[in-house]
Image: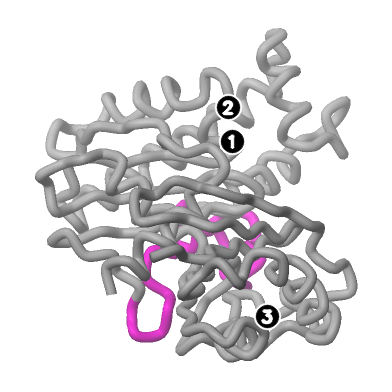
Amino acid sequence: MTTLAIDIGGTKLAAALVDDSLQIRERREIPTPASKTPDALYAALTELVTPLMKQATRVAIASTGIIREGILLAINPLNLGGLLHFPLVQTLENITGLPAMAVNDAQAAAWAEYHALETEDGEMVFITVSTGVGGGVVLNGVLQTGSGGLAGHLGHTLADPQGPVCGCGRTGCVEAIASGRGIAAMAQGDLAGLDAKTIFSHAARGHQQARDIIAQSAQTLARLIADVKAVTDCQTVVVGGSVGLAEGYLPQVVESLAQLPPVYHVAVRPAHYRHDAGLLGAALLIQGE
Ligand SMILES: [Zn+2]
């Protein structure tokens, strides 16, 4: 069977035909409508999937936000604008005439990464560090989504009660410190206003403040990894995302984790997939249904 997999992100919408051996046959991508209105998203999704849908038998969606019973929600509803409560599954079923399912994009990516590990272990945690911090948890070989869709939102666990206020409204979340947005927000003086990518390149050239900010992010992530080890007894933590996979970042995380007592040590691996983990994870999930 061929799955029409769709990835709905903050800046782009991607779709691909994925076969049962997880090969991507055709892939299309368009920008996410800036207006964030339901009509604009409906039109964009129609444009995206129409050339592909006749070859598919089902639709699997990975999306930013919280997916609860096929409907789009978010920890910070302001991020979604007019798309709060957008009926993702119903909309795609209407456009394509095919059965559809939807899952959070980091949860989908976690499932793809779990399969790529080809492990006998039942427990694995995936953490993506990019603009925000997201994740997915596999227990007993089953991806945890939670009845409300919240499971695995690891970026919104507490890192520092005296830390910066997070987009979710809580003070001191991991995301507020470790994410690309958090890194940029911490920059002062000659680094003020720069994005995370530029701060990383300054760090690579030896800029002390840039190095300190990135070290703080890496230490925060290491503490999160220790926490998820304690909660899940996972044998592997897979780290992805533009910050997570940035040159030199993961070795700092591993070094920081190694300074904690041995019970917290866990294998930390870079993500196998760079771009299509959401598409492939969603396709894998619908295959397993
Ligand atoms: Zn938060």
What residue is rendered at 59% in x and 47% in y?
177
- In reply to whether residue 2 is colored magenta, the answer given is no
Q: Nearer the viewer, residue 117 or 127?
A: 117
Residue closest to the eye, 21 or 234 = 21
Q: Main secondary structure of the magenta part?
A: loop
Q: Please give the count of numbered marks on the rendered protein.
A: 3
Q: Mark 1 highlights which residue?
A: 243
Residue 260, by quadrant, is top left
Start-end of magenta stretch: 146-173
Q: Is 42 on the left-hand or right-hand side of 74?
A: right
**Which residue appears farthest toward the top when viewing the image?**
205
* Amino acid type for the residue under numbered disc 1: Val
Which badge, 3 or 1, is on the more N-terminal residue? Answer: 3
Amino acid under disc 2: Ala
Per the model, the C-alpha gap separating discs 2 and 3 is 29 Å
Contact, mark 2 vs mark 3 (Cβ under 8 Å)? no
Q: Contact (CB < 8 A) between labels 1 and 2?
A: yes
| Dot label at residue 77 | 3
Q: Is residue 160 magenta?
A: yes
Cα distance, mark 1 to mark 2? Answer: 5 Å
- Pinpoint residue 227: horizontal percent, then vertical percent: 28, 51
Q: Which residue is mark 2?
A: 246
